[in-house]
Image (cartoon, helix red, strand yellow):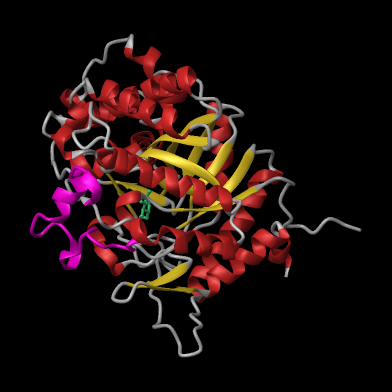
Amino acid sequence: MTRPSFRFPDGFHWGAATSAYQIEGSPLADGAGPSIWQRFAHTPGMMSNGDTGDVACDHYRRYKDDVQLMKALGLQGYRFSINWARVLPEGTGRVNAKGLDFYSRLVDELLENGIAPNVTLFHWDLPAALDDRGGWLNRDSAHWFADYAEVMFKALDDRVPRWATLNEPWVVTDGGYLHGALAPGHRNKYEAPIAAHNLMRASGAGIQAYRAHGKHEIGVVFNIEPKYPHSDSAEDLAATRRAHAYMNQQFADPALLGSYPPELKEIFGDAWPDFPADDFKLTHQKVDFVGINYYTRAVVKHDPQAYPLKAVPVRQPNQTYTETGWEVFEQGLTDTLTGFRDRYGDIPLYITENGSAFYDPPVAENGVLDDPLRTNYLRKHLKAVHKAIEAGVNLKGYYAWSLMDNLEWSLGFSKRFGLYHVDFATQQRTPKATAKLYAQVIESNGSVLDE
Ligand code: BGC
């Protein structure tokens, strides 16, 4: 019998992902402290349509039902994040037992249903009390994070096989400290590199804490968006290198190589600090895996007006764009995986997020929701993942973004990435056609993609 062409390696891990502020709701319940996202969302003008995470998917109360949705898909793994301020309302010190208990119950529920938890410690919702002390601009943030991580490891590592320190630190600094579209909403070129550096010091300190208190695997999750030059001109090639260094290497390099790419100094100019050499001993820790979040690529052109990169993305004619304005470009996922392996070596990798927002029609009376554009995106990207494995990339698993429609940060509920549709008025969940395809992919370990 010949092996079906899109069958994945035995043991390939299939999951779906979410994050705390995007789905949980009840952000202040049971003694939780506010996070920066709680504050940001309640600041007039920051969120599309005035949406907030006050209710979101009400997962904090409906988590048992949601685990059944995962089971119905046949998920082997579920990636979620901890709201730090539920566990440590002031960010440091006192532990809120009820907050910790929520995550402990969630982990038990997953395990009882045969689903492996994959826990992200920081998916953007910094405790507001720590922001009041300077947040990621304060060098102490590395120690705050390591102390919080230790609390979590001691409570859950007996049951959690896979951890990540941070999710997408680039988004935190670009959106939160440079351009201000995301919490904490700063617009300051002098702050962004400092916040970035402290995030990677925190990740390193968290990994060190794991070596002392944990027994399984820990890694870190980066968003990678490959950059392709608009033309062969020297200016466009240099712009592409800057864009790549800024987004794709600014965090992975200090974590995996112990240094920064030289382009960052060029980009930030006098805002780029001379970081103490010793810091790189902390940022550069051995990881058990790296998680890569992939959504799209950018074709890059030199533009002297564009701040701070002097580079702009160029829209591609005749290509499909998602509702978040991202080009559907699956070859970029293959290139990301092979490129990452070529630069950083043979580290085990996971795709920890991949997905698309498209307009969804209302749920039909027969309960069916066809989402052909999203289904097409999933199909194409899984084939691209398979191609990378054939090219020898050590890829261990794939998590779809997202289990269900949720709060797309400052874009509110307007962008739907879910495998399950959520009616936010009734909290009714309905599987989309993409969920059905994904269940078949999992069941057949990819063979269904041959059809
Ligand atoms: C984040 C998610 C987000 C998704 C879609 C990633 O940047 O980790 O929280 O919802 O992309 O924008």
Q: Work out whether residue 360 or residue 435 is closer to the camera in this orientation and state it.
A: 435
Looking at the image, residue 318 lies above or below residue 282 = below
Q: Quadrant of residue 61?
A: bottom left
Provide residue 175's location: percent of width, then percent of height: 23, 45
Looking at the image, residue 404 lies above or below residue 104 = below
Question: Which residue is painted at 46% across and 69% down in the image?
Answer: 420
Q: Work out whether residue 18 or residue 347 is closer to the camera in this orientation and state it.
A: 18
Q: Work out whether residue 53 or residue 333 is closer to the camera in this orientation and state it.
A: 53
Q: Residue furthest left?
A: 44
Provide residue 122's location: percent of width, then percent of height: 34, 38
Question: Which residue is painted at 25% across and 40% down in the image?
Answer: 85
Q: Quadrant of residue 53?
A: bottom left
Q: Is residue 270 left or right of residue 433?
A: left
Q: Residue furthest right?
A: 1
Q: Is residue 56 left or right of residue 1?
A: left
Q: Is residue 57 visible?
A: yes
Locate the N terminus and report the quarter of the image it occupies: bottom right
Provide residue 294's location: percent of width, then percent of height: 46, 49
Provide residue 35's location: percent of width, then percent of height: 20, 44
The span shown in magenta is 29-58
